[in-house]
Image: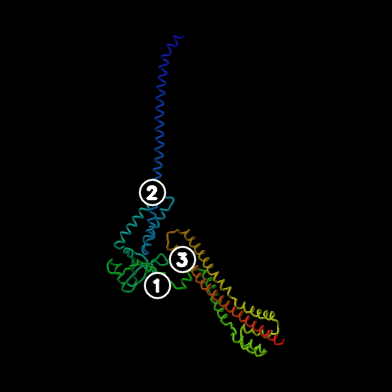
Amino acid sequence: MRQTIADERIPLASELRELETKVLGLRREHDHMQRIVDNQSVDLASLEAQVKSYDDESAYVSNLLNDYLNRVNASLAVGEVNHYGPTLLDVLNAADSEDSTIREKITTQLDGVDLALGRTESNIGGFRFPGKAVLPGGKVVEGNFLELGPIGYFAADAANAGLVTRGSSDTPSLIVLDPLAAEAINSFVASGSGSVPLDPTLGRALAIATTKETLGEHFMKGGIWMWPIAFFSLLAIVITAFKLVDVMSLKLMPASSINEINTLLKQDKLPEALHIANQHNGPAADMVKTGLKNFHLSRELLDEFLFETLLTVKPKLERGITFIALAASVAPLLGLLGTVTGMIETFKLLTLFGTGDAKSLSSGISQALITTEFGLIAAIPACILGAIITRMVATRMGALETLMITFGNGLAEVKESSVKVAA
């Protein structure tokens, strides 16, 4: 058995070494394949990161091109809107489409860039193209535009030629300067050479001139809320005028007449004192007459009669002042309400049509602010007038109270003198 085992040990050892060698080879092959798989995973992640980076760069370039085309579209001269506007609008719409790939978007945007660069090159030497413009009388005529850098001209004939400006619609409006300038512009547009007037303000002076409007036109732009503001403003003016007449017409008895009446009472000449009081009119005279008629009463009761007469005057003087304060408070609130309503309408249009036309958006906001403007215009004078009327009423009431105290003290003095004489 020992000999058999010894004989079989050597072949088994050789076979074991062969198997160990094979296992080591397989392990090395496994490690190599594992490294290949790991390298492939790393390369795939790197490729995915590179693809994402390229996509981000493409989106950034597309956004830059879109921003450039938007600025070109916004900077189009009024005569170029109908010529270049539709093409640029198609390019911008295609760039915003979600169905297009980034390659298709950039290709379309590059076509728009080529159009914009061609426009710039054409305008350097003057670019002429046909179109329509609105004459000063409102008639739409066909003619030729000529864009010379930032200045635009239009000519239909020798009489209807001049500079162009933005009108209320998409159609440019023609501004005819004078017959000589119109003839020169018509010849310049037709031949491409000649002497023409230039606008050094690049249309700003004409734009400012077109924004000038009458008070009625400015008022009507505010909308429906302008009418209640005008009503409260007119109400404050009417009440103020009425109160001025009412307060100024309030007559006060002169101090000399009061002193003369007190002197006659001391001399026991009540009929003569009453005669002097009857020569005057107004609440002060009524108060004096009331005091003379109730001369026989006690001081406390007589003061109550005089104060009662004073109280009948105060509501008459103060009536209507509340409405002036109401108008001063309500007018700016109505203006704010009109502004909020106008801004809501502006944002509705912004939701529907976007922010492509900043001029239309600013125009809507300015119209919405007109109500606040007129609300403050109505409120500030109403506050000032209300304060003036209140001060005048307080002054008149103070004068009546002073007169009542002076007259009451005089009556009390007369009574005390009578009592001492009787004693």
Q: Distance between the residues labelled 2 and 1?
A: 51 Å
**In the picture, residue 415 is in which quadrant?**
bottom right
Q: In the image, what residue type sits under mark 1?
A: Gly
Which structural element holds mark 1?
A: loop
Would you say the residues marked 2 and 1 are in contact, meaning their CB atoms lie under 8 Å apart? Answer: no
What residue is rendered at 40% in x and 19% in y? 17
Q: Relative to residue 191, is residue 89 drawn left or right?
A: right
Q: Name the residue under label 3.
A: 366
The image's colour scheme reads rainbow
Would residue 272 appear left or right of 119 to someone viewing this image?
Answer: right
Q: Which of 380 and 5 is in front in this view?
A: 380
Q: Which amino acid does label 2 sit on?
A: Ser
Q: Disc 2 on helix, strand or loop?
A: helix
304 or 190, nearer to the observer: 304
Dot 3 crowding, Cα within 10 Å, few <14, some 14–19, many 20+: some
**Mark with earlier residue (3, 1):** 1
- Location of the C terminus by quadrant is bottom right
In the rendering, at what x and y percent does residue 399 appear? 59, 80
Asked where in the image residue 130 lies, by quadrant, the reply is bottom left
Residue 333 at x, y percent in the picture: 54, 67
Q: How crowded is mark 1: few (under 14 residues within 10 Å), some or many (20 or more)?
A: few
Q: Identify residue type, mark 3.
A: Ser
223 relative to 406, above or below: above
Write down the residue under mark 2.
58
Please provide percent x and percent y for residue 248.
Answer: 56, 81
Question: In percent of the image, x 38 and y 70: which residue is there?
Answer: 135
Q: In this view, does 311 lie above or below 368?
A: below
CB under 8 Å between discs 3 and 2? no
For label 2, the crowd category at 10 Å Cα-Cα, with few meaning under 14, some 14 to 19 and many 20 or more, is: some
Tally of numbered tags: 3
Quickly name the residue at label 1. 137
